[in-house]
Amino acid sequence: MFVGAFEILCGLALVFVGARFLEFALQFLAFTAVFLVVMGLGNVFFPLTGSSKVPLIATLVVGLIAGAVGGWFFKSLIKNYGVMLLAGVGGLMVGLMIVSPFKMAAWLKYLIIAVLAGVAAFFGKNYDKQLKVLGTAVIGSALVMHGLGSYLGGFPSFSEGNAGFKKLGADWSYIGYIAGWVVLAVLGAFIQQKYPGDAPKDDVFA
């Protein structure tokens, strides 16, 4: 529930003002990625949902520290590869939202997601300005939908791993998530383009 609320709040920030604070948004995404990897590994090697809370607390602490370090090191990559990486993460989110409800081998789902992320990253090198807005809106919207899934159900949880993908079907609830994702992403991109705010004086992508 805490992670769901965190995703919703951060997702809304990315949807509506992400392009204004792109450097911080990318560092946040790097932090989140490292944190989730650590939590996933912890879930493999330790009983995080057992009666003892020590493994869970220890994994959370290690995940937060590792995420902070990862975000700090990621800053050096932002200037040259920021938009490309943003587009790649956006492609990953698109792949996740599209393939999740379909019944197919887990490895095939991951392959499709990886291909979409790679294609999006490739095009990210050529459409800099547009992807700053669209990428943050798409990623933020996906985070909001996943966060809502923590409360409403019908969306695979990170903690469920492959099982979450395998049992999920293309039912009306998931179609609702897809519709909400698209509408929120379009709305966020429109608002960010119509009301861009003051451009930062030290634009790392300039």
Image: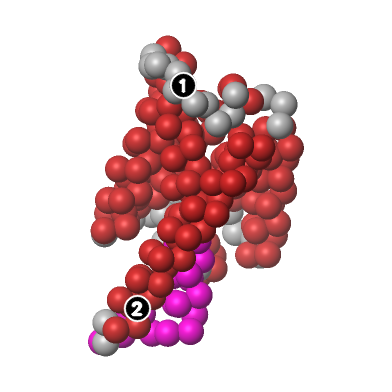
Please state the horizontal and vertical placement of residue 151, each as a whole percent of the image.
Answer: 27, 54
Q: Residue at x 44, y 23 (%)?
A: 200
Q: Which residue is mark 1?
A: 201
Q: Residue at x 59, y 29 (%)?
A: 205
- The answer to which quarter of the image holds residue 58 is bottom left
Horizontal side of residue 178 vs 132, given as left or right: left
- Label 1 Cα crowd, 10 Å radius (few <14 / some 14-19 / many 20+): few
- Label 2 Cα crowd, 10 Å radius (few <14 / some 14-19 / many 20+): few
Secondary structure mostly taken by the magenta-highlighted segment of the chain: helix
> Residue 77 bears which disc, if any?
none
All told, the count of numbered labels is: 2
Boundaries of the magenta span: 34-51
Secondary structure of residue under mark 2: helix
Horizontal side of residue 106 vs 197, given as left or right: right
Horizontal side of residue 190 vs 94, given as left or right: left
| Colouring | secondary structure
Location of the N terminus by quadrant is bottom left
Q: Is residue 169 above or below residue 206?
A: below
Please state the horizontal and vertical placement of residue 135, each as a whole percent of the image.
Answer: 54, 33
- Magenta-span inclusion, residue 36: yes
Q: Are marks 1 and 2 in contact (CB under 8 Å)?
A: no
Q: Which residue is mark 2?
A: 58
